[in-house]
Image (cartoon, rainbow, N blue to C red):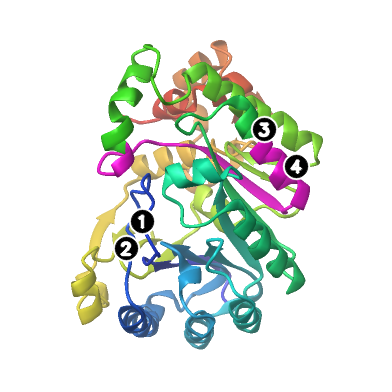
Amino acid sequence: MPSKELELYLHIPFCVRKCDYCDFLSMPADEDLRRHYVDCLIEEIKQKAALCSEYRVTSVFFGGGTPSILPGVQIWELMEALQRNFKICEDAEVTVECNPGTLTRQKLIYYKMAGVNRLSIGLQSANNQELQRLGRIHTYEEFLDSFGQARAMGFKNINVDLMSALPGQKQEDWIDTLNKVLAVRPEHISAYSLMVEEGTPFYDQYGEDERRREQGEPPLYLPSEEMEREMYLITQELLRNKGYVRYEISNYTFPGRECRHNIGYWKLIPYLGLGLGSSSFLEEVRFSNTKNLKTYLSGENFSQEDCAYVFLDKRQRMEEFMFLGLRMMEGISRSVFQQMFGIKLEAVYGNVLEQLQQQGLLKQQEGRVALTEAGISVSNYVLSEFLLL
């Protein structure tokens, strides 16, 4: 089997209803349209596999949208196509993103048959009022049912997505959500703060409030920056006390259950994106599919020649190595940097490293460079310092 690693991402852009905060490429669709899309995705798998004959696939990730909106047999069909056309490792991590309320026993049976061994369930909050405010289609009780069904079907690697700093959310609300999720003991928890993105209904409702907060003025609906920081610290403490290890700024896991797909992305492992609007990174080149559904369904965007290409020069690859790798608690390796780029880390970033270390935002130990706790709290600033202008 080839020695070069590859990750596969399959984008399923459909959902029951688009959430009010979501700026991902997603939309509602009827059964016929979803069936047509899956057929086109299988055809793309066949055509794009030729780009990756020298790679072995170590992870497969079905993201969205809501992949669990598809009938289970269609996930099985997609995995069958991947197995036929790619060299997939026997121990590959295979993840399907799921929303509570869209999982059924039949779908879980098909997932098992297809080789899916990891689920990522988008709960966001255990408070039904907060879920309604977010525009979610499910309740906390439906999450418990979906999680219980997954456990009953033998899934032993489950992530739960959570979101803090919601409009009107208090610290005690967030603590209640964390405690309820900890009670079911998922192997992995992703805990992110709400981002109010332009072009979403949330931006229309809370964009001005976000600007007030950024300018140091008291927000009307969103938690203050101080409260958001407190929620972050509470998350870290509660999860650590329950045996979870934080291995990335917003990701916590039981030892050995780190998300291999995400780690590969943060470490610049090559990946191939399949489906509407998906992005790829192969041989120092980024390319992406069309975001136009009609064009994608026509099959006109499947060939290598039709993709939009961006070649990453050495400077850009060094930047990405730093600001992606520093998201991980272990930080980046000096020796790996030198191996990848043929130059010592200090020769490129010596002044930046010294300045950030003096500010208490970076630490250097055992051949690695990592964020300190203070650095994590201002990570956007720290990471931006590694841009080579």
Tell me the crowding category of disc 1: few under 14, some 14 to 19, or many 20 or more residues within 10 angstroms, Cα based.
many
- CB atoms of marks 2 and 1 within 8 Å: yes
Counting every numbered tag in the picture gives 4
- For residue 175, the mark is 3
Secondary structure beneath dot 3 equals helix
* Residue drawn at (33%, 18%) of the image: 212
**Residue that carries the numbered disc 1 in the rendered image:** 18
Depth check: give the residue in front, 275 or 66.
Answer: 66
The answer to whether 237 is drawn above or below residue 60 in the figure is above
Secondary structure beneath dot 1 equals loop
Say what amino acid the circle numbered 2 marks: Met
- For residue 27, the mark is 2
Say what amino acid the circle numbered 1 marks: Lys
Disc on the earlier residue, 4 or 3? 3
Disc on the earlier residue, 3 or 2? 2
Disc on the earlier residue, 1 or 4? 1
Displayed quadrant of residue 57: bottom right
Please provide percent x and percent y for residue 222: 43, 26
- For residue 265, the mark is none
Task: Let me know if residue 177 is in the magenta part.
Answer: yes
Tell me the crowding category of disc 4: few under 14, some 14 to 19, or many 20 or more residues within 10 angstroms, Cα based.
many
Segment colored magenta: 176-202
**Residue that carries the numbered disc 4 in the rendered image:** 244
